[in-house]
Image (cartoon, helix red, strand yellow):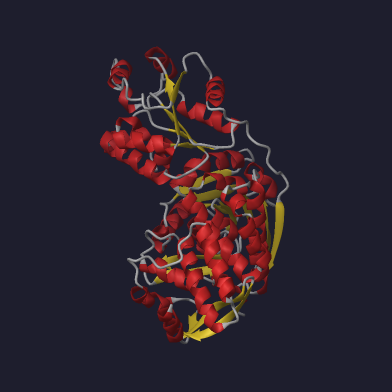
């Protein structure tokens, strides 16, 4: 479904109408104001009062940049966001823009007694602002009056204007992947539309929980998850951290410790990681270390985290010397992978996760690789059946490997690092900016497959299939020009897979078949120079 962007004067009902449209259609509601409040940890009125309108408008610009490329959302915007020409261009590019029209009398009725509107403090402010903004909403694709109508009535009108289909039926039966390790047993549940049933999957409901997320995911899902848990009389403490790999640090973890300890969080309470790989890694590390271990539940919201980062018990943070150098093994007590959450991902973020799917197929399942080749359009179109199949199969493969070698003692678990030796070098060399994890792993797979050609029976034709599939999913296969191999080599020495100068390198012997090769690091560098 094309994104729907709601614009209009304050009091026009953008949030209420947006939620009503999202309920009717296969989409997710998002509010720019809510994202700003989560990021700033204060209300809109406080921002206006203490930082001014100019600062607030900059925050709106930042939010619009952060959500560019997202899909299947209904976006409610702030009343003045359209004052900026660049914002108007971004909104038009993001989706179908709908103007909710409203008269001054209706605004005053709806906002009577509302003292949280900083621009309406003066007498005649409504009329003056409406006059000032006359014509500024005209770039909208369509408009509809809201006077005398309920949000549901307005949502129905807009749905008919845009020919929106009612929410499609979703598969209710969850795939259950049991994970049994020496440090704990738990289930991974995979299905579309199961988030609302979250309490049913928790064996012993906690009295309190803390949800760790970022402003974007929080804007999409936090209120929904809070409502779900609150319905079971669970007290919820939301903790918002900045988005991005560079915030996966001890500094961020320390701030989370402070909040939890200030709120007297104890071991019987539960930590919930709501987000992608950065969020689940950080949440897991906090759970493992706070008071020597708290309850942990992961709700991975990206494809990458649903097939990899959210499962397996690896937790940790980055260091300037390299990625994931500080961490622990700590298993969650539940992982809930809702396929429906993947529909809002940008194309780039979705492809980011496909790299890990390809990796999993390459090391253990030739049939999954063939499925990706034959059903690539179904996968790229995010058909629920295809996504549930690949997420479930990736989880099963990772489960089998983790159960065999939970803490990487035998070396079997190192197979999951295929593509990551070069990938982590690229990420560290780029200072975790500009190159996403999946993109770095895709490059790593392309290069490490060629190294494998020199160390195993991997055929040239198979390398061709690997390169083709990576490119079919619009992922890179070569190191960015700005990053030279010579400049990123230094990061190899910090790789956790190196011991006494020997690298444990996952090597492909064929598609779906892999082994660990112990390779002196200087020999690995020599192979890299030959590619």
Residue drawn where x is 67% and y is 49% of the image = 385
Task: List x then y, in percent, for residue 292.
Answer: 54, 65
Count of marks overlaid on the render: 0
Task: List x then y, in percent, for residue 102.
Answer: 41, 17
Quarter of the rendering occupied by the C terminus = bottom left
Q: Measured along the vertical axis of the image, is residue 506 above or below residue 467?
A: below
Q: Which of 8 and 198 is in front in this view?
A: 8
Residue found at the far front of this picture? 461
Q: Is residue 329 visible?
A: no
Q: Measured along the vertical axis of the image, is residue 165 above or below residue 466?
A: above
Q: Which of 273 and 473 is in front in this view?
A: 473
In the figure, is residue 261 to the left or right of 201?
left
Q: Is residue 521 visible?
A: yes
Residue found at the far right of this picture? 173
Quarter of the rendering occupied by the N terminus = top right
Task: List x then y, in percent, for residue 490.
Answer: 36, 77
Q: Nearer the viewer, residue 39 or 322?
A: 322
Residue drawn where x is 34% and y is 68% of the image = 483
In the figure, is residue 367 to the left or right of 68?
right
Task: List x then y, in percent, for residue 268.
Answer: 60, 55
Residue drawn where x is 46% and y is 66% of the image = 477
Residue drawn where x is 45% and y is 72% of the image = 422
């Amino acid at each position: 479904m094309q994104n729907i962007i709601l614009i209009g004067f304050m009091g026009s009902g953008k949030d209420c109408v947006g939620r009503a449209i999202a309920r009717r259609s296969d989409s997710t509601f998002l509010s720019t104001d809510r994202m700003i409040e989560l990021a700033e940890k204060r209300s809109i009125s406080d921002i206006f009062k203490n930082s001014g309108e100019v600062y607030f408008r900059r925050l709106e610009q930042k939010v619009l940049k952060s959500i560019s490329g997202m899909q299947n959302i209904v976006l409610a915007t702030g009343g003045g966001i359209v004052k900026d020409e660049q914002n108007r261009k971004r909104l038009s590019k993001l989706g179908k823009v709908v103007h909710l029209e409203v008269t001054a009398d209706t605004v005053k009725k709806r906002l009577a007694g509302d003292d949280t509107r900083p621009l309406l403090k003066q007498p005649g402010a409504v009329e003056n602002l409406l006059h000032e903004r006359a014509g500024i909403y005209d770039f909208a694709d369509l408009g509809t009056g809201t006077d005398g109508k309920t949000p549901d009535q307005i949502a129905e009108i807009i749905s008919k204007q845009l020919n929106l289909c009612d929410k499609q039926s979703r598969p209710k039966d969850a795939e259950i992947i049991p994970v049994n390790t020496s440090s704990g047993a738990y289930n991974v549940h995979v299905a579309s539309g199961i988030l609302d049933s979250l309490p049913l999957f928790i064996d012993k409901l906690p009295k309190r929980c803390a949800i760790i997320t970022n402003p974007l995911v929080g804007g999409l899902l936090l209120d929904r998850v809070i409502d779900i848990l609150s319905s079971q009389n669970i007290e919820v403490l939301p903790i918002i951290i900045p988005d991005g790999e560079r915030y996966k640090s001890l500094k961020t973890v320390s701030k989370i410790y402070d909040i939890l300890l200030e709120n007297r969080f104890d071991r019987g309470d539960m930590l919930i990681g709501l987000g992608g790989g950065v969020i689940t890694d950080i949440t897991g590390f906090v759970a493992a270390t706070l008071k020597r271990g708290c309850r942990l539940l992961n709700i991975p919201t990206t494809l990458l985290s649903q097939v990899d980062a959210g499962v397996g018990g690896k937790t940790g943070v980055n260091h300037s010397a390299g990625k994931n150098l500080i961490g622990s093994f700590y298993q969650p007590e539940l992982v809930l992978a809702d396929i429906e959450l993947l529909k809002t991902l940008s194309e780039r973020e979705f492809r980011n996760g496909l790299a890990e799917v390809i990796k999993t197929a390459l090391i253990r399942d030739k049939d999954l690789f063939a499925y990706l080749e034959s059903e690539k359009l179904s996968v790229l179109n995010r058909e629920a059946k295809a996504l549930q199949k690949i997420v479930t199969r990736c989880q099963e493969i990772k489960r089998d490997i983790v159960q065999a070698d939970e803490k990487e003692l035998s070396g079997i678990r190192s197979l999951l690092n295929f593509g990551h030796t070069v990938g982590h070098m690229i990420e560290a060399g780029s200072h975790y900016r500009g190159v996403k994890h999946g993109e770095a792993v895709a490059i790593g797979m392309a290069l490490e497959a060629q190294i494998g050609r020199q160390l195993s029976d991997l055929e040239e034709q198979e390398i061709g299939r690997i390169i083709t599939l990576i490119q079919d999913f619009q992922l890179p296969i070569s190191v960015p020009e700005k990053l030279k191999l010579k400049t990123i080599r230094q990061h190899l020495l910090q790789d956790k897979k190196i011991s006494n100068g020997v690298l444990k390198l996952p090597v492909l012997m064929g598609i779906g078949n892999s082994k660990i090769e112990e390779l002196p690091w200087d020999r690995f560098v020599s192979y890299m120079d030959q590619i």
